Image: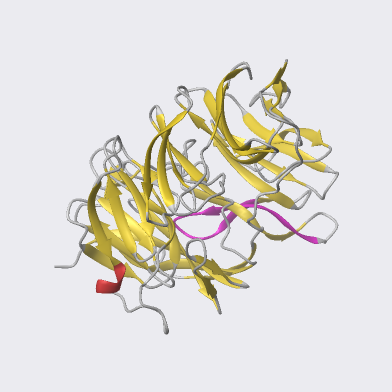
Amino acid sequence: MKTVLPFLAAGILIASGGLAYVTLGQISNAAPENLLAGNDKPGFRAEWIAQGGDLNASGYVPGKLGDQRFGDAAWTFSVTGMRAPSDFVVSGGKAYFFAPTKNRNGVELNGIVAVDVATGKTDWAWNDRAGYCLIGINKGYLYAIVGEEQTRQLISVALKDGKAKWRKDLQSVGKDSFLTSKGVLWYDGNFHLSSFEKGDAAWDAMPMLIPDIAFAVTGEDICLVGSAPGKGVQMALINGKSGKDISSFTLPDGPRGGSSAGIWCSGGKFIYGSRGDELVCADPKKGALTVRKTGIFPSRPAYTANTVYAFDGGLLRSFKPDTLDQIAEFDATSVKAPPEGRKVTPMFGQPVVTDDSIFAGTENSTLVLSRDKLTVLQEISSGTLPVVAGNALFTWKPVDANLQLENGPTLVASKWTLSCHLMRAETK
């Protein structure tokens, strides 16, 4: 089935974010007990299945830290690349990402590895082709795009043993590939939804825009945001089951003129976005921005049932989800000195929010804060850009980083260190 959404034809935008190259490091102090959260023990949802943690990129991870804290790094990896990888997922006590491995012919390439969270040992490696985009996890299988340009493949790999269930040849594909509740969404000038079972096309759609991001919202529906010549930046909602368009509208210009697609997360019937110097709330079904909060430079927002969180330079701010009125703020400079020559201590990426805590990455550390009072519970110096799953915290530490503050704080580094910390009882 082909559906044409009301956009004008354009080209293709490849999203930024390079692959990471990983070398196995030393393993020490691993503690396998209490790895996955249960009803009778503290911890968080044991899965981080896609970028932003879930299908909606919400940054929210159910579970509680309680009186637990995180110990020293149980294991580390040395990582080489321009950015810390977004291609990183966790499920069933294993972390999955791209790493250098040797294939059957002895050629080293950037394959998929499965690493035991408790021990740091590699469980298996899939290295028939170099990795390009790790999309996410669904019901025991990992979905990724691999191969060189013009010879890409979409693959389904079993989590238990790394064996490929199926492969689908792709002539060309953009970096924007996403997991939805119905299948794998990928883009090659048109949008395609491939089924989880066989990789065959569930539907094909031609939205006629340059996509910047896509994600699942309100169940099976999918929201697309992108540029259309002569129409500026548009937002469209399509039915994830059929590919048929539901609604679309043009986003208004930002406070400084012009418009950007922004970065978004889903929250119930609304989606929340950072568009340069404003935080916005959109209702894609009604085709309107319902609230615009100007005068701030927010990160990708995080959403829970009753609160929206975003970094704003050196501030962590919380907002009411319906009005975006500010609830509270935390200034990282109050507990951590800013980099030399700076007035603020910037925070990076997206807040990771749990039921009782918030994880915020500064330039070279992660702050763990209480969600109710925004007070610092722990500072972890191993790195920034935190991910939490089960009873593990993962951080990335840049080496010789270039701190860029235009259009929001960004870290660019040629080398990174991935660290895994496991929860432990707090020492009183």
Side of 240 where 317 appears, left or right? left
Whether residue 97 appears in this view of the structure is yes
Task: Say which of 80 and 255 sits in front.
Answer: 255
Indicate how the structure is coloured in the image.
Answer: secondary structure
Q: Name the residue rendered at 39%, 57% in the picture.
A: 393
Q: Is residue 203 above or below residue 292?
A: above
Res 142 visible: no
Where residue 292 sits, quadrant-wise, is top left
Give how far across and how far down residue 347 sits, in percent.
40, 64
Left/right placement of residue 55 relative to residue 425 reads right
**Residue 115 placed where, x, y %?**
55, 54
In the image, residue 20 lies in the stretch drawn in magenta? no
Asked whether 180 or 44 is in front, the reply is 180
Give the residues drawn in magenta, as a range: 108-124
Q: Quadrant of the N terminus?
A: top right
Q: Residue furthest bottom?
A: 340
Name the one closer to the observer, 121 or 157. Answer: 157
The total of numbered circles placed on residues is: 0
Q: Residue at x 64, y 20 (%)?
A: 243
Q: Position of residue 246 (x, y in %)?
A: 56, 18
Position of residue 241 in the picture relative to residue 28 (left or right): right
- The chief SS type of the magenta part is strand
In the rendered image, the residue lying farthest to the front is: 257
- The quadrant holding residue 191 is top right
Residue 258 percent coordinates (x, y):
56, 48
In the image, residue 58 above or below residue 427: above
Which quarter of the image is occupied by the C terminus? bottom left
In this view, 355 is above or below 344? above
